Image (cartoon, grey):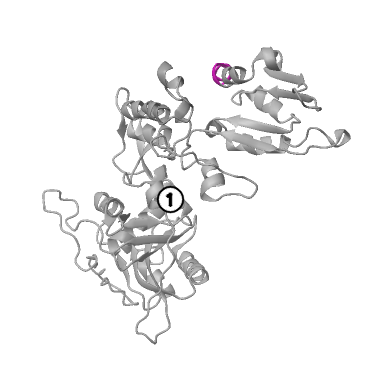
Amino acid sequence: TGPQLVDTTIKTWMKLFSEAQYGKFSTTSKTHRWRFRPEGSKYLIDAEFIFRALDDPDDVANLLSLEVSGMWMNEMREIDGTIFAHAGRRCGRFPGADMGGCTWGGIIGDTNPWSATSDFHEMFVANPRNGYKFFHQPGGMEAEAENLENLAQTPETLALPWNDPKRREQGRTYYLNAVRDYSKTDADMYVHSKYGTDRSGKPVFEAYDDNVHCREKELFKAQDHPKAVPHTPVYLGWDNTGRNPAVVVAQKSDDGQWRAQYELCAQGMGMKAFAAEVKRWLTQQIPDFRIIKITCDPAGKAKGADDLDMRMLIVQAFPGVPVLNARTNDPATRIEAVDGAMRRQILPGGEPALLISKRCKILRTACINKYRYRKMKISGEERYTETPDKITPYADVADALQYLMLGGGEGRLNSGDSSKEVKWPEGGAAITMAKPKGWNPLGVSDRG
């Protein structure tokens, strides 16, 4: 906002570039004009620095008519992605061709960590675009932490040489006090330099940490016998109800680690068409795939408009592949199947038992915070809905992951009854729901 611009950015600027040395700052137009020849230089510096807050409609409108060499965006995470895109079109326009042309044009920015669901995260981190360079500052508690020599210094430590270890030790107290005072979420952002979360809801998968669980693992192959042609074994989780189907494709390593590798979502598509599309897409992504098991939404046992069990449409597309319903649709059990694997470690090495590839952009965003409990508008306390918000496509792909994990043996067996002792599946086999009664022309089996 305008007042924040004056109180923070401009105040810091004037501390670095005083009027006594660099010329008068216009408080009316919020511009600082430099025109001087540095000592020992034969070249004159003639520059104008224009300060604008980008929350006011007039300032945004003025931005679209500017002709500048470049821009510095302070606290970029607060700037709308559309404004950033328009701003880039105004850079490199001064000086014009009649003045010799602009030798450099572009945008420089600084910011505290943004939410991993922000447009900037997608642009610079998740799917970096050409022409940009991203620098991630180390966290304040890391050995490589920057600027400790200048933070929270005492008169005694300021008298020491800049590179004296005692200055870094004193500067570290700035972050130690911050960790003491911040919530874990804020400490992750403002101290440990981790990407934050959107506060409009509570993430369903509380154990998910994008810095830990989002890792790349190459697809591994298997052979039936030493002379057999290698194939890529995969598991599929399928949200096969409604008009917004979704599939997650994962592998399970010999040490029990789940690796979600691909995702596919559709909107307004029938199950038969989506099943055919999944087969085409999977053949394109993994030509030598072999499906170990497909686990579906048990609600798919309800008859569709064509009077068929929804799984039968999947069986038609993948003949010979075990297609089963998840053993339960109990929300707590489904969530535990995923969240429990995220919390569990694979030894040796300590990696989580569930990893998600960067290719799974929707699933990754869902895990961060788009698959969430909605915050309720209740005065005086923070309360959330008991069931996750059904936000398409994030909830659909999150559901598909839950069915996949249930089909692979994750989650407690005594679903819905916390009074019983928790038991875990043996040998990785999931317990499935009973075979649907009545007509079953395709011979669908619920046995995995």
Badge 1, how many Cα within 10 Å: few under 14, some, many 20+?
A: many
What span is colored magenta in the figure?
Answer: 1-8
Q: In which quarter of the image is the C terminus?
A: bottom left
Position of 145 relative to 322 (above/below): above
Q: Position of residue 213 (x, y in %)?
A: 38, 52
Helix, strand or loop at disc 1? helix
Q: Which of 138 and 79 is in front in this view?
A: 138
Q: Nearer the viewer, residue 42 or 392?
A: 42
Kind of residue indicated by mark 1: Arg
Q: Which of 41 and 441 is in front in this view?
A: 41
- Asked whether 371 falls inside the magenta stretch, the response is no
Q: In which quarter of the image is the N terminus?
A: top right
| In this picture, residue 83 sits left or right of residue 143 | right
Quarter of the view holding residue 369: top left
Residue bearing the label numbered 1:
364
Q: Position of residue 272 (x, y in %)?
A: 46, 67
Q: Where is residue 409 in the image (x, y as percent from the top left)?
A: 25, 63
Position of 15 relative to 243 (above/below): above
Residue 308 makes an appearance in the image: no
| In this picture, residue 230 sits left or right of residue 128 | left
